[in-house]
Amino acid sequence: MSNQVIDARALLVSSLRALTDTEMMHLLRERPDLLHPIPPDIERLAARAVSPSSVSRALDRINRSALQVAEALAVLPKPVSINQLATAMGSTTKSIPLSIKHAVAGLRKIGLIYGEDNNLLTPDSLVDVVGMYPCGLGGSASNHVEASVLAANPAKLKKLLATAPEEAQFIIEKLLWGIPVGKVADANRHITVETAKTPIEWLLAHGVIVATGPESIMLPREIALELREQKLFKELDPGAPEVTPDTSSKVEIANRAGGEIGYRLVRLAEQLLDAWSVTPPPVLRSGGLAARDLAKTAELLDVDEQTAALLVEICFAAGLIATDVYKEPAWAPTTAFDLWRIKDVSVKWESLILAWWHNSRALFLIGEKDEKGDRVNALQPGLDRVGLPIVDLRSLTIEALVFGSNNAEQIVDWIHWHRPRRDRKTIHKLVTATIYEAEFLGITGMGLLTNAGKQLLHHTEIAGYLAEFLPTPIDYIMIQADLTAIAPGPLQVDIERELNLIAEIESRSAATVYRFDEASIRKALDAGKTVDAVKKFLKKISKTEVPQPLTYLIEDTARKHGALRLGYAPTYLRSEDPGLLDALMKDVRVTALHPVRIAPTVVVFQADPEESAAILGQSGYIAMLESPDGTALIRARQKRRVALEGHSNKLEHPSDEVLSSAVAALRQGDAAAPSARPKNAVRLTTAETVGVLREAVANKAKVWIGYANEAGREVEHVVQPIRLNAGKLTAFDQRSAKVGDFSIARITMIAIMSE
């Protein structure tokens, strides 16, 4: 047995070494957990590849046909030939079905099968992680005498069931091809053939089913196989369900629509980051963005809260937003934003798409209630879901969209075939979220995948594909007599930024509608714009004449602007209108400033000018700062930035460059391995090592071991095992000619020495 374990592991190592670089890259791409961290050599890669956690992750990423083969191999004795496998799975043809051939080839490529077709092997851990009831089979009848006797006599079993009550036959049929267990009250009570009254009792009394607990029954594996005529499956998997393409849509239309969406996405991101530069929202004590701040952000961007949350999260994933701990923690743009904003629109768009593509946070949970009944907020910690295959299912959804279908149910069926171990409800939720998010990002346009979206699956640069379909920015607007302006297309960046200071966006669609009012004009004046500069700018960019009502609005607002002036004494407020100060002194909203009237036109506050201006503004009093000589001060708004430290996305889509470097490192580590090591030396799990040592003690066999010493270096020993006790091996060490103890946990490699 010990030699079989060692030989099997050695075969896996040699199989991995025989892979070409391209094949090795495929293995690592399909099993990205093997890259974290990169193993130092192929022997350690093999040891990691057969660990239960890694095998389980690999099973989570295979399709239903491959899972059938994996379950069959977990049930069949090892090694097994591909012909024996096909027969056991129910194939009745002379040639091996293509579905089985393809499944075996696919499993071999990801290291879950190794060896030749006449000698197929699998990791021992496969049995533990493939599922409780592989092939729908229960446990063995070996601990149940009557069931064991019955299973050993097929003729008696069939004859017995022919006389069984009809209801009992129905129960057997349900257990035979479905889940082989069921619940029954008082299942393990003593029942005889004479005392059996119900169909369940009849089956228990005759040993056809067995009690496995006080309330549980099971159809034993051996009996099930006899009744199935040794077939592991009722039928072979027919293959992936069909995805019907939507022939009514055209890719050209999708590309153009996606380009317009992408342009708007970039502008929304810039608008968000500019706003948060000046007034960064606070970080909740528990982390995240408060619901009221999300609502304000949605109102600012003129989008719904779901869209605002998605945009905020994508900017965070792209490294454009982080926590600024200056004074009070707040969400502010990072220093990366200043570099990002000067790049081409296509590059900015690409960065947002890729940030989403690699993002493992469960964005669709935002706004819902968590397990404690609390609201899930945007940017809150803990949205990374290790148990949810977000990145993998997102990739599969985009792959399904390549076929041209935008039917969510068809896509869910298709993905569930490719990931049968995943819960269908979870798949449906993630597919729905991905379709919505892809449309928001411009990866799809009008529900159809764009050319740039297709490139995501190949992990290539997509900025070039994005640039091709971006709309050409325009440099004009059309001002209407009703104090609105229409931009019939995306505006050039500098014009859009300037216009946003003067007007508010009223609606967005194919064209953007802006509205001018007193508040919007005041915003421009607060930013330091003069009346002449505002009028000159509007005249320059408008294809129509600037209407007189707008000119009057600008001039009237300018006359009122600065009616209240704020200075230092420690802070004073003066106004030519005593009635305005009368109202202010009676306003309870400004009592926090402790106002003192020192003259009919002057009030003094105890707070500094910045705090006074903020509270006055919140109370509806707009005050202008002035210098000691009465000159108006243009208050430059300080833009917050936070350094970006250690921001990274967890890549489940490793690039070809990363994979190529990993393969090179594995080859280099392999070449540096000690040459004196026995050829059959392998790395085993601790349990496997104990099994090998136990047999070596029984057979008095010498063993070569690699052993990690106190300094962590691997040293070699040839030992004669004497006994195993409390996690230690007592053995005669040939090098020192002494008996010593070796910690089994420190044994890194092992080989049985030939005589």
Image (cartoon, helix red, strand yellow):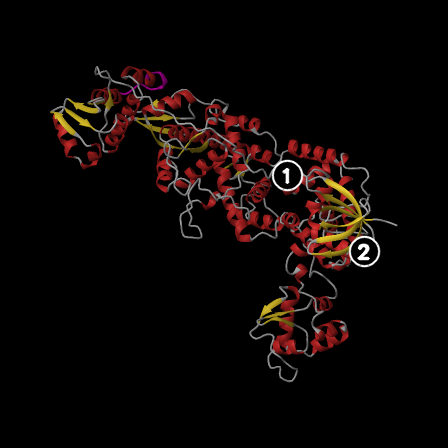
Q: Which stretch appears magenta?
A: 539-547
Label annotation for residue 675 = none
Q: Residue at x 57, y 71 (%)?
A: 215
Q: Residue at x 40, y 26 (%)?
A: 488
Q: Is residue 111 above or below residue 322?
A: below
> Which residue corresponds to mark 2?
94
For the N terminus, the quadrant is bottom right
Q: Secondary structure at mark 2?
A: loop
Can residue 37 be seen in this snapshot? yes
- Look at label 2 and name its amino acid: Lys
Q: Residue at x 62, y 51 (%)?
A: 417
Ranked by sequence position, the earlier of labels 2 and 1 is 1
- Look at label 1 and name its amino acid: Pro
How dense is the environment of label 1, judged by Cα within 10 Å: few (below 14), some, or many (20 and up)?
few
Queried whether the magenta region covers residue 336, the answer comes back as no
Examine the image and state in which quarter residue 141 appears: bottom right
Is 226 placed left or right of 455 in the picture?
right
**Secondary structure, magenta segment, majority class:** loop
Can residue 482 be seen in this snapshot? no
How far apart are the two marked residues, 2 and 1, measured between alpha carbons?
A: 45 Å
Is 681 placed left or right of 709 in the picture?
right
Q: Is residue 170 above or below residue 660?
A: below
Queried whether the magenta region covers residue 544, the answer comes back as yes
Q: Is residue 417 above or below residue 643?
A: below
Q: Position of residue 161 (x, y in %)?
A: 69, 76
Q: Position of residue 104 (x, y in %)?
A: 73, 49
> Which residue corresponds to mark 1?
37
Q: Position of residue 34 (x, y in %)?
A: 66, 42
Q: Nearer the viewer, residue 328 or 370?
A: 328
